[in-house]
């Protein structure tokens, strides 16, 4: 079928080697050099991380995430090494973070770099050092044609583990050996899709690069025949590969990524794969930030439940946005509000909330007034509902829908029973 046809269109190993040649590697591995020192493990606890996402995990989005969860590890969107090297006088544009109320820190926050040349990556890491990131991550997993194809980095880097190890070693040296270097990768590339491949990749990067932290998207990257969106869903998930890595390399930390939608699913995976240190969510946080993050501190880290409501998130973000626009009055308002528009994802009048934000910007209201006026469009019981209340409402709504379905097919139940069941479903859904 379609799945088999896609596989048949994937690039061959010879095509992948051509990419290595364009990197200046000639298709041959860099001479192995044992790492002089092991890169340190992060002092932060990466049991839950928000994945790096291009055009999503910018400074504004990370600030909104930190309002909801105080413990989640946050990643920047990928910053290409050449971007920093060619803009030494404007580094703040790409690397500044944490503007806003001083009491709300983004830490722990990880800078993700993209590139393939160890010298350039080391230079970029050195330029980023003064900004105080808690760790630096090398992107070895992005399947985008612009990155892994013409760019010859991202997932393509997995085809040359020795070069990845050299890059990590050089970045660690550029940072004085005190900042952890980690790698985000897939479990395979194109036709090279087996446990031995990812195991050998980790072994080389660990031994020669000194890396001890890996975030693994548990799918292979198919660089020919699939779009980036398809690469997030079509290649099969193999969580067991990451569990095997944790067993084979007990001195390393492995964070599991791919196909995880909720904190409940994340908790279940951590219980099932005891050696895996943490989990990483991306699109689920982008699509439903409050739903994905409100339970992280309690469910994953064992902290007391903060009970933060969606109204609290909007009000705190409104204060941040107001502070930001005061300092940067020419900044894009649409970029500033983008992280908060889906805070009522799936809730009653959530779309009205989004539209009210757009209308407020068109009306040229002050940014704080834009968000607070939009908030008034959402029913109070929805704005103030805790995650526990919303979860209970979802369960009740599901049960009510099932009862209504049974009532409709049970002729002996009568019309009144069906109507009562439907009304029960509607009532339970009022907090969703």
Image (spheres, rainbow, N blue to C red):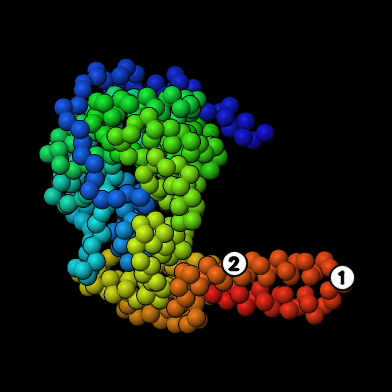
What residue is at 32 percent from the left and 73 percent from the top? 316
Q: Quadrant of residue 211?
A: top left
What residue is at 47 percent from the left and 82 percent from the top? 380
Quadrant for the C terminus in the image: bottom right
Q: Quadrant of residue 396?
A: bottom right
Compare residues 423 and 314 and report the one nearer the observer: 423
Say above or below: 96 vs 87: below
Q: Quadrant of residue 402?
A: bottom right
Residue 320 seen in render: yes
Residue 83 seen in render: no
Say above or below: 81 vs 364: above
> In the shown orientation, is residue 291 left or right of residue 76?
right
Q: Which residue is tagged 1?
A: 411
Quadrant for the N terminus in the image: top right
Q: Residue furthest right?
A: 412
Compare residues 365 and 282 and report the one nearer the observer: 282
> In the shown orientation, is residue 211 left or right of residue 239?
left
Q: Which residue is tagged 2?
A: 395
Secondary structure under the numbered disc 2 in the rendered image: helix
Count how many numbered circles sit on residues in the image: 2
> In the shown orientation, is residue 96 left or right of residue 58?
left
């Amino acid at each position: 079928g379609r799945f088999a046809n896609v596989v048949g269109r994937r690039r061959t190993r010879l095509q992948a080697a051509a990419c290595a040649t364009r990197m200046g590697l000639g298709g041959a591995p860099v001479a192995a050099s044992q790492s002089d020192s092991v890169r340190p493990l992060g002092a932060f606890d990466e049991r839950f991380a928000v994945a790096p996402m291009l055009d999503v995990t910018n400074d504004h989005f990370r600030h909104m995430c930190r309002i909801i969860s105080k413990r989640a590890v946050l990643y920047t969107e990928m910053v290409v090494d050449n971007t920093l090297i060619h803009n030494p006088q404007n580094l703040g544009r790409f690397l500044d973070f944490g503007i806003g109320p001083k009491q709300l820190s983004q830490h722990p926050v990880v800078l993700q770099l993209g590139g393939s040349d160890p010298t350039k990556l080391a230079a970029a890491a050195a330029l980023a050092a003064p900004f105080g990131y808690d760790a630096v991550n090398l992107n070895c997993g992005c399947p985008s044609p612009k990155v892994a194809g013409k760019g010859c980095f991202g997932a393509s880097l997995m085809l040359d583990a020795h070069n990845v190890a050299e890059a990590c070693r050089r970045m660690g040296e550029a940072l004085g050996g005190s900042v952890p270097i980690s790698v985000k990768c897939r479990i395979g590339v194109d036709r090279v899709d087996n446990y031995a491949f990812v195991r050998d990749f980790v072994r080389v990067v660990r031994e020669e690069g000194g890396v001890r932290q890996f975030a693994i998207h548990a799918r292979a990257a198919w660089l020919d025949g699939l779009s980036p969106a398809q690469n997030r869903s079509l290649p099969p998930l193999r969580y067991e590969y990451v569990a095997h890595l944790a067993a084979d390399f007990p001195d390393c930390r492995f964070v599991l990524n791919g196909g995880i939608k909720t904190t409940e699913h994340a908790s279940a995976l951590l219980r099932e794969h005891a050696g895996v240190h943490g989990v990483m969510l991306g699109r689920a946080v982008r699509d439903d930030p409050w739903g994905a993050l409100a339970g992280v501190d309690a469910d994953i880290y064992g902290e007391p439940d903060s009970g933060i409501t969606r109204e609290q998130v909007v009000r705190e973000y409104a204060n941040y946005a107001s502070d930001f626009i005061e300092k940067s009055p020419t900044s894009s308002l649409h970029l500033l509000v983008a992280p908060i528009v889906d805070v009522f994802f799936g809730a009653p009048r959530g779309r009205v909330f989004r539209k009210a934000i757009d209308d407020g910007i068109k009306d040229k209201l002050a940014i704080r007034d834009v968000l607070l006026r939009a908030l008034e469009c959402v029913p109070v019981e929805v704005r103030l509902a805790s995650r526990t209340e919303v979860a209970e409402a979802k369960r009740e709504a599901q049960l009510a829908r099932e009862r209504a379905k049974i009532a409709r097919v049970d002729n002996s139940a009568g019309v009144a029973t069906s109507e009562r069941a439907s009304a029960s479903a509607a009532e339970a859904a009022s907090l969703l």
